[in-house]
Amino acid sequence: MRTRTNRFIRRGTAVLALVAAIAAVPGFAAPERGDPERMLERMTRHLELSESQQSAIGQLLQESAADGADDRARMKEIREALRAQGENFDAAASESLTRELGEVTARSAYRRTETRAAVRDLLNEEQRAELDAAESERGKKHGKQGSPGERPRQ
């Protein structure tokens, strides 16, 4: 029995490490962690977006936020259920929950990356360069090496 528990702990640790790695994936347009309207305002101000860019990017950010709403709610439920495992630990339930959390986190990371790419496609070269510089600077402020698109997890 002890071997099975040790194996579960090792697997659980690996799954959690994977989840943490996925969560650290660079993301720019991440309305899942922010207000899409606020993001659009900041982008408009810093990148001098045209009216058509504002409209298109605003729609992308709103759609991404809406698409991620169910995943955000499910992640919250899973985290609460995992915290509750401290009282009455159920190895099978915990393993299932951590696997699901990894899947949901991966979907969210993909959605952020996809949205970021779509936003970048709407920018001109000068705006992309400005965006890359701002992201690099933000990464340096938060202790990251500052490659374009790198965003610290908060």
Image: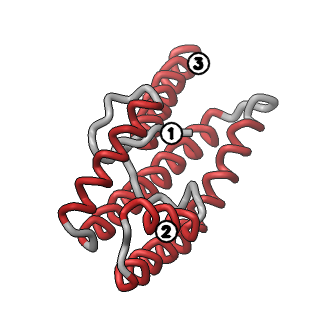
Along the line of sight, which residue is nearer the eye, 135 or 97?
135
| Alpha carbon distance from label 2 to label 3 | 54 Å
Within the image, what quadrant is residue 128 found in?
A: bottom left
Q: Mark 2, residues whose alpha carbon is within 10 Å: few (<14), some, or many (≥20)?
A: many
In the image, taking residue 90 as reference, residue 129 lies left or right, namely left
Residue at 49% over, 55% down: 104
What amino acid type should be assigned to the residue bearing mark 2? Leu
* Residue at 49% across, 45% down: 99
Secondary structure found at label 3: loop
What residue is shown with label 2? 40
Name the spot of residue 6 as percent of width and height, x first: 52, 17
Residue 63 vertical position relative to residue 134 in the rendered view, above or below = below
Q: Quadrant of residue 85?
A: top right
Q: Nearer the viewer, mark 1 or mark 2?
A: 2
Res 126 → quadrant:
bottom left
Q: Which residue is mark 3?
A: 1
Q: Are marks 2 and 3 in contact (CB under 8 Å)?
A: no
Viewer-side label of 1, 3: 1
Looking at the image, tell me whether mark 1 or mark 3 is earlier in sequence order.
3
What element does badge 1 sit on? loop
User: What separation in Å lies between label 1 and label 3 (alpha carbons)?
Assistant: 37 Å
Q: Earlier in the sequence, mark 2 or mark 3?
A: 3
Q: Give me the C-alpha separation between circle 1 and circle 2.
A: 20 Å
Q: Amino acid at mark 1?
A: Arg
Q: Tell whether 154 sits left or right of 19.
A: right
